[in-house]
Image: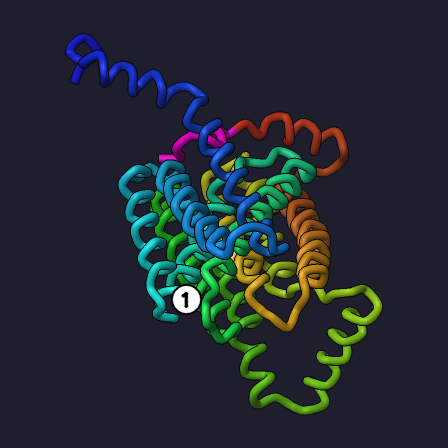
Amino acid sequence: MSRASASPLQERVARISASRLPVAAWLVLLAAETAALVCAMVPVGPDWLGKAGAVAVASTYTWALAARTGGRPVIFGLVALGLGLLGVLNSQDFLHSGAAVATAAIAAVLGVMVTVPAQSILSAARESVVAILVAALGALASVGFEPAIRVTRFEYAVLGIALVGAFLVVYRLGAGFHGLGRRGLLGVAVGTLVLLLIVLYAETLHRYGATDLIDTLDGWVAWSREHLGAFPRPVMAVLGVPALVYGGHMRARRRQGWWVCMFGVAATARVATGLDDPTIDLTEVGLSIAYALVVGVIIGWLLIRLDLALTGTHGRGRRIEEQAAALRPEPARTQSLL
């Protein structure tokens, strides 16, 4: 329909959509939801406050993810609202748990999708923090549904769903498999290998591995928790955060960076499920995330330096020139990627 034939109502809707009003309203709503979830954790206020905040976060996050990925935010937001209400108004544990899993997975994917390309290591570290904060609110909402879960299965379910969701989005953003290129293919191969080693091998090791090795690893964890207050989360420190840092660096230069960023859900999914383990207090959860973030940024920085060295960008002057030339266009954080 041409602009001349558009109705006054359609023109008004278009003007509102093009303005900052929807984003401002979304941020205000998100702040109110966060306040409700924090009050429920203290606890302060009525008993239903936590569940109401959880349903609201699930709906607004779904709306934001659909808007960011070129979907239909109103439709998906209303569907999420309906399913969330069904989960909290019903006494069935599997509905509460299902709503918690879905909310955590959506938060994990959204945390990666709201990042923007990073020209420098500082901006890459900033985007990693943004992704972690988005996922952290998803963790509050997940707890708000009061799920009845087995922690390990819950974490694996969220990670698996988030990986599938991120892959489907990145497949479109990265122009399919033929848009991988050598760098993208190498990133996907290494990311998959690291994920398998951390998740599958670690699980097998604790079930069937040598006792001495298990005792050594457990000793490291115990020492870190005793002297540092927490132990960095391996999947975040070794895979998730480095993928966000290095992937953001690549996205500022080439489209294949999205394939690396896809593995950033290994960090955001771990954050989104971090509060569901009742055996770990809030302080330890925060410290473990902070330590993993620091270690992951360092690993990501090393990957960036290795990449620049392999491409012949030696010397501070050359790196500054390369950074200034990294201006690959991408929509802003509050705009649709597709």
The reply, left or right, for residue 151 in relation to residue 223 is left
Specify the segment rendered in magenta. Answer: 328-338
Q: Residue at x 50, y 56 (%)?
A: 47
The reply, left or right, for residue 166 in relation to residue 284 is left
Q: Residue at x 47, y 57 (%)?
A: 104
Give residue 320's position: percent from left, percent from top: 70, 29
In the rendered image, residue 335 lying in the magenta stretch gets the answer yes
Quarter of the image for the C terminus: give it: top left
Prevalent SS, magenta region: loop
Tell me: residue 24, above or below residue 185: above
Q: Residue at x 67, y 27 (%)?
A: 321
Indicate the colouring scheme.
rainbow
The quadrant where residue 19 appears? top left
| Of residues 8 and 332, the one drawn nearer to the viewer in this rendering | 8
Give residue 117's position: percent from left, percent from top: 54, 36
The reply, left or right, for residue 285 in relation to residue 224 is left
| Of residues 73 and 276, the one drawn nearer to the viewer in this rendering | 276
Tell me if I can see residue 265 in this picture: no
Q: Residue at x 50, y 46 (%)?
A: 112
Type of amino acid under label 1: Ser
In the rendered image, residue 157 lying in the magenta stretch gets the answer no
Give residue 46's position: percent from left, percent from top: 51, 52
Give residue 212's position: percent from left, percent from top: 72, 90
Helix, strand, or loop for circle 1? helix
Across the whole image, how many numbered discs are drawn on residues?
1
- Residue found farthest to the top: 4
Residue tagged by mark 1?
A: 97
The quadrant where residue 35 appears? top right
